[in-house]
Amino acid sequence: MIDEAKYAAVYSILMLGLIVEILIAVDRSALGAFADAGILAIAVLQALFIFMVYMHGRYGPRPVAVFAVISLLTVLPLFIALLYSVVMPHHGSLP
Amino acid sequence: MPLKPFYEERGLPGLVPALAPSAEQWQSLFTLYIIAAVIVAGAVFVMFFYFLAKYRKKPGAQDPKDAPRVGVMADRGNPALAAILTALLISLFFGLTLNTFALNAYLQNPPNDPNALYVDVIGFQWGWRFVYPNARELIGEFRVPEINRTCTPGVRGCWSGTVILNITSADVFHSFGIPDFKIKRDAIPGRVNQAWFVAEQSGIFPEAIRCYELCGTGHALMMADLIIQSPDSFHDWYLSGV
Amino acid sequence: MVDWHPLKRWLFTTNHKDVGILYLFTSLYFFVAAGLLALTFRTQLALPSNTFLQPDEYNQAVTTHGLLMLLWVLTPLGAAFANYFVPIQIGARDMAFPRLNALSYWVYLSSGLLALSSFFASGGTADWGWTTYAPLNTVEFSPQVGGSMMGLALMLLMASSIVSTVNFLVTIFRLRAPGMSLMRLPLFTWGWIFTSLLMLWAFPSFVSALSLLIADRAFGTVFFTSPQGGSLLWDHMFWFFGHPEVYVLLLPGFAIVGDLFSTFSRRPLYAKKIIIPCFAIASILSFTVWAHHMFMTGISQSLLEAFNITTELISIPFAIIVLAYILTLRGGSIRFTTPMLFAVGSLGLFIIGGVTGVFNSSVALDTAFRGTFWVVGHFHYTIVGGGLTGLFAGLYYWFPKITGRMYNERLGKIHFVIYMIGFNLLYFPMHLLYDMPRRIFTYDASTGWGPLNLLITIGGFTFGISQLIMFANLLWSARRGPQASQDPWGGYSLEWGVPSPPPEFNFPEGVPVVSATGVTYRPVAAANGGHAMANGGHAYGGHGGESSEEHWSRWPVVTAAGAGIALWGVLMGLPALILGTVILAVSFVGWGYESLRGREAIEAIGEKWPFDRLENLSLGMWLFIFGEIAFFGTLFGAFVFLRMNSPLSGFAWPQPGSVHNIFFGGFNTIILLTSGLTMVFALMFARQGSYRGLQGSLVATFALGAFFMVNKAFEWKELFASGFTFSTNPASSIYYVLTGVHGAHVVAGLTALTYLMVKALKARSTTEAGASVEIFGIYWGMVDAVWVFLFPLLYLL
C-alpha cells in the first residue's frame, strides 16, 4: 500500500508540474524573463522524480542517482561549449 | 618578374626566411616547443633505453624475487613520483601556454589600423575569390601591398600594408591558408572569420594560397597565387581596373 | 573444444573464445583491405602530378581507409582479445550475455560488409574524409547513394559496439572470481573497462550526429544545409564523439604494453595503483578536449584557450603512465622476445606521438598545422605506433595461448625490425610536410614535396610488406609450430593458469580463487553451493556432466543478417528491405522462444563490487540507459545549438503555440506519464504476486503507449498538411527528428511489452515475469523522462 501511495503521489506531482508549465507558457508576462528558466526547472524536477521513484525498481534510489549524475556530467561540457560557441560574438555575419 | 620554381625561392619547408611578422613569431614559438620537446622526450628516451640495456636478461640470471606468477597481482612503486612529474609538466606547460596565448592574441586580433586593406575572401568549389573595397574582384590570384613604413596613420590614400581578411565560403567547408605567413582560418558557409597579416617583401609566389580542408574532388587544385607588390605598383593596379 | 560440425560452431557459437577468434580474423581482414587502400593512395602521391588515381577515387580511398582502420580494424582487434581474454582474466566461465556477444560480432561483420559494398554502389562510396565535414556530406555536394550506405553501416556498427560495451561492463563488474577485487584485475582488463566506458558515452553521440546526417540525406531535413546548423553543428557533434574515439583506439594496445613490460622484465608493474586512476582521468578528460580540432573555426577565443589547457592537461596522466611503464623495467631481467619488442616499440612510438600532440594543443601553432600532413603524422604515431603496435604485441603474446603452438621467434624479430623501419620511414617525414595539405590527390613538383612523399610511399610499402611476414609466420605456426606450454612467458593473469587453448568453460580445475599469494582452484562441489545449481547441475569446469549444447544460438547471426539486408534495402530497393525485415521479424520471434537468460545461465559467483545489489540484467539495462542519455543529450545539444544560433543567423524561431498545439501536446504528455504510472503498478503487482493486477497494468500500459503513438501520428499528419514539413526550417527538422527518435523508442518499448504480455499470459505466474517487468520498467521510465524534456522544449519554449 505504501508503494501505491508513493507512486500516486509522484504521478500527481508530475501532473501538477505539467499544468504549471502550460500556465507559464500561455501567460509569460507573470514571470517575465524567468518564464523559460521556470519551465526548464519544472522539467528537470519531473525527470528527477521519474528517475528516483519510477525507475529504481527494487534497488533503492541511490545507484540510480549515481548513474544519473555521472551521465549528466558527461554531456554537460558539450552543452556549455555549444552554447558558448554560438552565443559569444564572432567576427561577423554574411557579407 | 619571371616565375621561379617555388622551392628555389623559399628553400625547403621549415627553413624559410620569414616573409611576415606572423611567420617570424610563429617560428619562434615553434622553436620554443621544439626545444622543450627535445629536452623532455630526450630525457625519457635516455632513461628508457638505459633501463632496457642495463636490465636485459644476463645469461644464467635468475628471475627477480617478485617475478610475476599466475594470480599474484603484486604492487609496488612510489606515488610521490607522479606528483613530482605532474608539477614539472604543469610548470613546463605554464610557460608554453603563456607564449601560445600571446601569439594567439596577436594572430587573432587585427590591429586597429585605419590604413589597413580589407579584403573579402570567399572560398568556392574550387577556388578563392578576393573582393577588394572598391569591388574589384580577383580569382586565382591575390594582390596585396607590402609594408609601407612611410604611410602615416590616418592619412587617406595610402595603405600601411596591414591586410585584414574576412573569410567565408560560398558552398562547403574550406580552410584558407597561407603557409608562408603561417596564417590559416576556416572558410565556413554562413560565417565570417577574420585573419590578418603584413607582408614584408614583394614578390610573386605561385600557389602560395591553399585550401586545408577536404572540399571535394578539386581540393588539391584549390590554390591561388600570392602577389605582393610595392605600395606604388599595388596602388596603380588597384585603381586601374575599376 | 567441443566436437561440433565446424559450420555450426562458427555460425552459432556463443562461446566468448570462439567469438574472439571470429573478431580476430574479421578485423585482420579489414586491416588488409584498409591497408591496401592506403597503398593505392600512397602510390598516387609517390610522384608529383601522378595520375594513378582519379580525384574521386582518391577521396573515396582516403575516406574508406580512415573509417575502416579506425572503426572496423583497431577497436575490433582490441575486442578480439577482450572477448577471448577478459572473461578468463576475471575468472568467469563466459560473458554475462553470451548471445548478445555473438550478436555484437555478427552485427559488426554485417556493418563491415555494408560499408564495403558501398564501394560498389553507383557513384562510389563516401568521399568526404572520415571526419565527414558538413556540408560536403549533404546530398547537394555528395549525392552518391554509397555515402548514405556508409552512414547506415556506421550506425549499425555503433549499435554493435554499444551492445558489446554493456556486455563487457556487466561481465567485468559482476562476474569476477572470488578474491578478484577490481585492483587485482590485470591492466588489459582495466584498459578494456575504460575503452568500454568511452565507447558507451561517445558512440551514442555519433549515432545522434549520424541520425541528423541521414535525416538530411534521406528526408531532406536542413540540419547541415542551413546556416543555423551547418558546419559548426557537425563539428561539435562529431568531435565530441571523435576525440574520445581516439582513446578508444589507443587504450587496449596501451594497456597490453603495460602487462607485457611487467611480464617480460619479470617485475610487477610499477605503481599500478597510480596507473589505473590515470587511465580514469585521461578517459574523463577526453570528453573535454574536442574543440582542439576546431581551433581555426573562429569560435570564441576564450573557449578555445580553455580547450588548449584541457588538451595539455590530458598529456599529464599519459606521461605518468609512460614513466610508470619505464620504471617497471628497473631491477628486472628483460627478455626481448617478439611480444616484448613490439611492446617496447609501441611505447617508444607513442612517446613521439604524445610529444607532437603537445604541439597540437597549442591554439597558436595550429595556424600552421591544421589540415596538414603534420597532423596525419601525429595521429598515426599515436594510433598506429601506440595502439596497433601494442595490439600486435598482444597478438604474438597470446598466440601460444590461443593456438597451443609457438610462433617462429626469428621471423617475429625480422617482422619487428622491418615494421619499425617501415613505420618511421612512413610517418616521420610527414612531420616535415607541415605546409602540405592533407587529402590532396596531387601536388606540383615545384612545391618541393616530391622527395619526402616518395620516401613516405617507400616506407608505406615496407610497412605493408612487413605484415606479410607476420601473417605467414602465424598461419604456418598455428598448424606446424612447436607445442607451447601452458605458461611460456611467466604471465600473471589467470589465462596463463589454464591449458592452451583453454577448454570450453575455461577453468578445468574449478572456480579460481584469488588471494595475495596466488590462485587456487576450488573444486566444483565445494564451489559456492548455489552456482552449480544455477546452471541446472552443470559443473563449472569441463567435466562432470557438462552439456556441449550449452554454447550456441542460431539467432544472433540471423538477426545481424536481417539488419544488414534491411539497411541495404533501405537504399537499394524494396525487395531487399522486405526480405531483411522478414528475417529480422523471424529472428525476434526466435529470440522470444529462448529463455531470457539464454541456455548458458552465466551467474555471478564471486566479486561484484560496486554492483552487488543490481542483477546482471538490470545493470545491463542501466548501462544501456547511460548510452541513451548520451544519445538524447547530444540531440538536445543540437536543439540548443540551433535554437540559440537562429537569431544570430537570421532565422526567427517560431513562437510557442504558433505551430504546435500546446494543449494537444499536453494531453499526449498526460497519456504517456499515465502509462509510466501503470508500468510501476505492474512492477508492484508482480512483486505482490497479484497475477490479475500485473496483467491488467501491462495491458493498460500498452494501450496508453499505443494511444500516444496514434496521437503523435495524427499530429504529424496535421503539421504536414499545414506545410510544416521535414525541410521547412531548422525548427521543423529538429521537431521531427526528436519526436521521431522518441517515437521509435516508444515503438520498441511496445514491441518488448508484447513479449512481456505474452509471457505473463502464458506463465500464469508472477515470479517468472517479475524480473523482466522490472527491467522493462526502467526502460519505460527513461522513455517518459525523455518526453518530460521534449514537451517543454518543442511546445513551450
Image: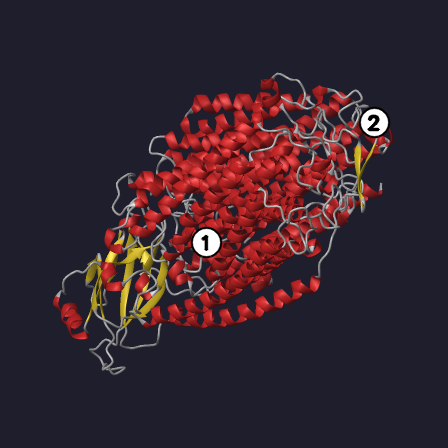
Q: Quadrant of the C terminus of chain C?
A: bottom right
| Disc assigned to residue C664 | none
Position in image of residue C89 (x %, y %): 70, 39
| Camera sees residue C164 | no
Is the residue C586 above or below the residue C462 in the image? above
Amino acid tagged 2 = Met
Q: Residue at x 32, y 38 (%)?
A: C57
Q: Is residue B56 above or below residue C38?
A: below
The three-letter amino acid code for the residue at tag 1 is: His
Q: Which mark is residue C378?
A: 1
- The extreme top residue here reads C5
Disc 2 residue crowd, few under 14, some 14–19, many 20+, Cα 10 Å: few
Does residue C623 appear left or right of residue B232 in this picture? right
Decide which of C645, C550 is in the foreground and name it. Answer: C550
Q: Which residue is mark 2?
A: C533
Contact (Cβ within 8 Å) of mark 2 with mark 1: no
Give coordinates of residue C120: x percent, y percent.
37, 30
Identity of the residue drawn at 39% across and 34% down: C146
Q: Nearer the viewer, mark 2 or mark 1?
A: 1
Callout 1: residue from which chain? Answer: C
- Give the image quarter of residue B224: bottom left
Find numbered disc 2 in the image and state the secondary structure of the residue it sits on.
helix
Left or right of C328 in this view: C125: left
Q: CA distance from mark 2 to mark 1?
A: 54 Å
Viewer-proximal residue, C430 or C634? C430
* Quadrant housing the N terminus of chain C: top right
Instruction: Give the crowd class for mark 1: few <14, some 14-19, many >=20 residues within 10 Å.
Output: many
